[in-house]
Structure formats: C-alpha cells, structure tokens
Amino acid sequence: MIEGKAHVESLDAEHELAVGDVSGIDVPEEQKVSPARRMTLNMGPQHPSTHGVLRVVLELDGETILKARPEIGYLHTGIEKEAETKKYQQVVPLTDRVDYLSNLINNLCYALAVERLLSLEIPPFAQWMRVILCELQRIESHLVWLGTHALDIGAMSVYFYCFREREEILKIKEMFSGQRMMTSYIRPGGLALEPPRGWHKMISKFMERIPNAVDEFENLLAANPIWVNRTKGVGRVPLEVMLDLGVTGPLLRAAGLKIDVRKDTPYSSYEQFDFEVPTRTANDVYARFEVRMEEMRQSIRIINQALAGMPSGPWKANAPHIVLPDRENMKTHMESLIYHFKIVTEGFRVPAGSVYQVVESPRGELGYYVVSDSTASPHRVFMRTPSFGNLQSLGPMVENGLIADSIAAMGSIDFVLGDVDR
Amino acid sequence: MLPEVLGENPTALAVNERVPDGIIGATIAVDGPVLFIAPERIVSVCRVLKDEAGFECFSAITGVDWWPQEPRFEIVYFLRSLRHNTRLRLSVKLAEGEPLDSVTEVWRGANWYEREVFDLFGVPFRNHPNLERIMMPADWEGHPLRKDYPVHGHRYSYQDE
C-alpha cells in the first residue's frame, strides 16, 4: 500500500481516508469500526470485474474492506466426475474447458500424464510443435489477462488492442484444428491432426507483428501515471504467506521467487530452449503486470527458436493400439481400419498406476493426477488447477484496502473460474 | 520399519526417525515414491516434512474413491520442495465415515482443498477452521465424486425441484 493518505475530493474537504498497509500491521484505533458502521456487501456472482462467476462477501467500512470471503462453486460442472465415465481419448475435450483461456496447455498436461502411464515416446517434431502451440497459448492467455485487467481498472482501449492480437492467435488455432478455442489439438500420442500446409509461414508472420504489439501495450500502460498510481503498492501479500496458501505462478515470481515448472522439471523438450524466468521483487500489482509482459516476450523468444530449428519427423507416436491411424491408411489398409475401430469403440487400456504430471500454465502450476485401474477409462482424474490455489490469497490481499484496490488486486491474481470450479 | 522399496530415500528416513509408526507402506509410481501414512500420524508427518525435510509448500490434496474395495477412500497429498526441487506424494487410506485430522495448521492453503474433499467425498476433517461445502450448494445432499453417486445426480439443483 502507498504509505500515507489518499486524499478524496469530497464535499467535506477535510475528510481524508487513511490508507492502511495490507501486510498485517495492526489497524490503528481510529479505524476500528463499531458493528453499526460495518456493512456486508455481496460482490455477487454476476459482476463485470470478478472475471467469471465468483462471489466475494465483503465486510466494509465505507470503502475499506475489513474482511473478504470468496465463495466459489458457481461454475462447477463436475468435469472430474465426467472424466471417469469417458475413455482416455474422450477426456481431452473436457480438459479444453477446464481453463478455457489456456486450452492447449491443459490438453498437454493430460496428454503427458497419460503418455507417462503408457510409457509412450513422442517424436521430437510433435514435442516441438507442442511447445510452439503452448507458448502461443501463453501469449494468448496473457493478452486476455492484460485486456480484462486494464478494463477493470478503467483503461478500456487496451482491451481492444489486446483482443486484436489475440484474434491472430485464434486464427492460427483455427488453421491447425478447425476450432478457435476448444481445439483438443494435443492428445495422448502426439497431435490430433497433421499440421496444415503453410503453418510455419502463418506463425512466422504473427511473430513479426507481436513483439511491437507487446512493447506498445506495455508502453500504453507503464507510461501512464494513473495506471502506475493504481497498481504500485497495491495487493501485497508476504511471500511466506503466499507459499503457505498454495499460490503458484506469476504471483510468486513477482515476489522474487524464481520458479517455473518449465525450468525446474522440464517437459516436452523445454530443456532444449533458451529462455529466462522473469522475476520482480515489489510483489504488487504493477510487478505482476511487468512479470507477465516479460513472460510474453520470453514466449516470443521460445517460439522463434522453435521455428528456426524445427526438427522433421512424424507428428504422432508409433503406437497403433493407442494413436489413430492416418485417414488414408484407414481407408485402404485392413489393419488400420481395425485399429481405428478398436480405438474408437473400445479405447486403449492403460496399465494400472497413477501419475501426477505438472506443467506451467499462464496462471501457475497446473497438475493432472491420473489414476488408472487398467481399464480403458480413467479411475480418477484430478486437476490441480492454479487458480484454485491462487484464489485463496484473495482474502489477505484485499483486506484493509479499498474496494477499488481490490479490483486491481483481483485482476492481478489472474484466476479463471473454470479453473477454480472445474 | 521402512518398506524395502524405499531404499535409502533420505526423506523417508527422516520421517521414519521422527514419527516411527507414520509410514505404513510405500510404492514407487511413475513420478516418484508414494508414502502410505497412518491416518493418526498425518499431521505429525506433514509437520516433519515441512519443517525438516524442506517441503515448504504443498501442491494439492485430493481424494480417490476405490469403492467397493475397502478401505474405500484414499486421500492423496502432493507435496513440493522448492529448495530441493522435488515432489512427494503421501497417501492415507480411510474407511467410510472415518475422520482425518486436518493439516491446515501445517499449510494454511490446505483449507480449501480439504473442504473440497469433504464436499465431494464426504470425508470429515477434524480441527478444520470452516468445514463446509465449497463446490456444491450448501444444502446439497450426497457427495458427488463417490463411485456410488450417479453422474447425472439424484436431482437437479434448481430451487423449486
């Protein structure tokens, strides 16, 4: 919090609000509120700034939040329960919809988990393709985050700029899979379809325009004194408290901790790429903004390296029992037809066991815990979603602050309700 | 006695030294060792892991329903050590209705995860700050992720049903 007072232009000019520090210093005497002055307000499930159906029950004294209690479950659709009734390959479209702003990364996590249970080797071309798609997805997710976060705070034009760039990524995803968002393109065994002709050129063209766009958006906001005033010093939670609460991702990186699953436990050939993990130490909304902008730049770097050094080879694993055959083979060869029929109708059996696979989602550590009982359907699919853990820090982050600061803080957590509720 | 499959795993040795009857079994899964912990010892084991073995943070807590096998529920704890860059999985097997101590005193963030396990599986946690339903509406009956709960539910969640 900015130490000092935020002067409010009101009818009685000597009315000044004392702004308290959120890091747990005792509330000064003049701020202790009698029950008669407390107001309980529902920042209800329908709200433009709660990024989905999140309910936050606020106890207020004027504009100061005394207590904030988030309530979730409004978007709970029972994805985990439904995954138990489907075959392994049928769970992939469900994973798209868990975190609907980073679909490919959820696909990848599930595919990696199942491939580990099957001990399936994925060819290098498919792995690098997955890296490109996931980094594009990361840029897309951060663009949406930037647009909506700025919109909440009041900088409305940024939203349109970000979504214009996002449109290019959606066109790329549509070119690959036919779908703009729920692509289900990364499946156990490799990719869903062969990458289309001209994919390299399309992504390269996008890579030419995105670095300028990222710089432009950052400059739009970072050079704006209103943005800086509204985000610097806001939404601080001490690092130990965040670790204790199970927070992961850019919130920890903005507090100085250099952790990133892509570096700590690399997956899908990330160890072959050269990129940095950006960190800041200020631990406020502005630092999280800077971290995410830098992450976009690092994603651009990874994609450029991948485009330059793309290996050649098959785009799916050589496992006829698990991976669907090419359509042409299926139409002309009897064995392929039988494999196709068996996989689609009966599915493939996965050896009994369990695995917890972790990837780095734009929101933090995303993990899928897949338990197999040696049938063609998973026994349990648990999705350790980053937003669920990050949202627990909402209470400490907004308490003793102003409502307007809580909007900025909520935006900086970057939670997605599909992630939280599943 | 430590199960032989763990070998000389230092974490397991440290836990075994502090909480002698904590580890009652182990297996090696695809992504590392899984320690089976006695239900009464879960809080002390977690405390040892956090304070001494360096597992400062945890990733998640969830449950698995093995109905009709007994014991029915398996509560799984995913732990993470940042300084050693390792992960560990703990597993506690519980029968139906058997309560389990909450680990919120070790990691505050276990709060919501244990609420979710209580809501969706019906496992009661002792010493939990606010054990109430988190995903389902507050007046819901039944625990949806149990294997004997149908996928489509017993009734709709509309108010007038």
Image (cartoon, rainbow, N blue to C red):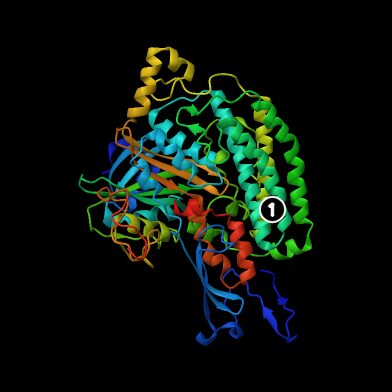
Furthest residue to the top?
A333
Determine whether, in the image, residue A38 is placed left or right of residue B96. right
Taking the image as drawn, is residue A262 in sight? Answer: yes
- Chain letter of disc 1 in the image: A
Furthest residue to the front?
B160
Amino acid type of the residue tagged 1 in the rendering: Tyr
Residue A366: % across, % down: 49, 45
Q: Helix or strand or loop: what does disc 1 sit on?
A: helix
Determine whether, in the image, residue A374 is placed left or right of residue A248. left
Q: At 45% across and 59% down in the image, what residue appears?
A: A74
Q: At 60% across and 25% down in the image, what residue appears?
A: A196
- Residue A23, above or below A168: below
**Camera-side residue of A369 and A421:** A421
- Residue A25, above or below A266: below
**Camera-side residue of A129 and A334:** A334
Residue A78: % across, % down: 39, 50
Residue B130: % across, % down: 38, 67
Residue B25: % across, % down: 27, 43
Q: At 40% across and 63% down in the image, what residue appears?
A: B105
